[in-house]
Image: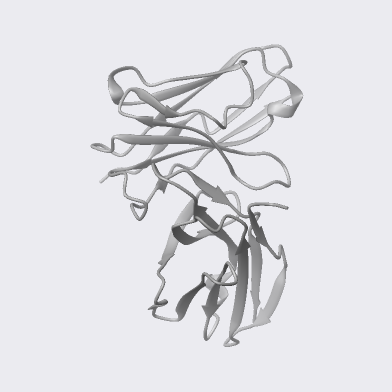
Amino acid sequence: EAGVTQFPSHSVIEKGQTVTLRCDPISGHDNLYWYRRVMGKEIKFLLHFVKESKQDESGMPNNRFLAERTGGTYSTLKVQPAELEDSGVYFCASSQGLADTDTQYFGPGTRLTVL
Amino acid sequence: RKEVEQDPGPFNVPEGATVAFNCTYSNSASQSFFWYRQDCRKEPKLLMSVYSSGNEDGRFTAQLNRASQYISLLIRDSKLSDSATYLCVVNSGGYQKVTFGTGTKLQVIP
């Protein structure tokens, strides 16, 4: 079974540009999460989709970030315009159920560098 | 105070040693607890969930102390392959919103 995949693996852009990250969850997983780890800090929750609906977006840093999950399959996270502090590793995760004990499976992450 | 706190380490231990990590959490309403392992430049992977009664998986033992609000991870007979960062993860409510600790780095040396 394929795991969570993310694209691209690395992205280097200049301040002010736009970048779109993609996440393909494990097939059949209704729950999809975005997380971010900036240098030297802990991994932080950004938002959670249940199918195509945003269940919780309390971790989104500001309105320069837009996440979508049309059709309830893959998700995109767009940063527009990117700022220097957006640099970090963006992880996507998916899980099957909503029980607290349901395992979240993480993708390999997208390493974003904003110059 | 951070929601989830861990000693960042590094913990440098010889092969075969026993090592223990603690993690404290601030939200007394927290319900679920996990240890994840993250190798350098890789994604976090679930190592084990932590149950109230404590649980063991091979060389790994996890404990939960609700009264003192901490969880622990014990690794016995350390292997070189155990070298990684161990992330403490706490779910503080429904819908699986989790909070990560900064991680504890373990280096097992020959």
Instruction: Name the image quarter holding residue A85.
Output: top right
Horizontal and vertical percent position of residue B93: 45, 47
Instruction: Name the image quarter holding residue A54.
Output: top left
B14 and B36: which is toward the camera: B36
Describe residue B74's horizontal placement relative to residue B45 as left or right: right
Horizontal and vertical percent position of residue A99: 31, 49
Describe residue B98's horizontal placement relative to residue B4 as left or right: left
Q: Residue at x 71, y 65 (%)?
A: B7
B28 and A19: which is toward the camera: B28
A41 and A107: which is toward the camera: A41
Vertical placement of residue A93 versus B105, above or below: above
Horizontal and vertical percent position of residue B9: 72, 67
Instruction: Name the image quarter holding residue B22.
Output: bottom right
Q: Residue at x 60, y 87 (%)?
A: B17
Q: Residue at x 60, y 71 (%)?
A: B68
Q: Is residue A20 visible?
A: yes
Q: Is residue B38 visible?
A: no
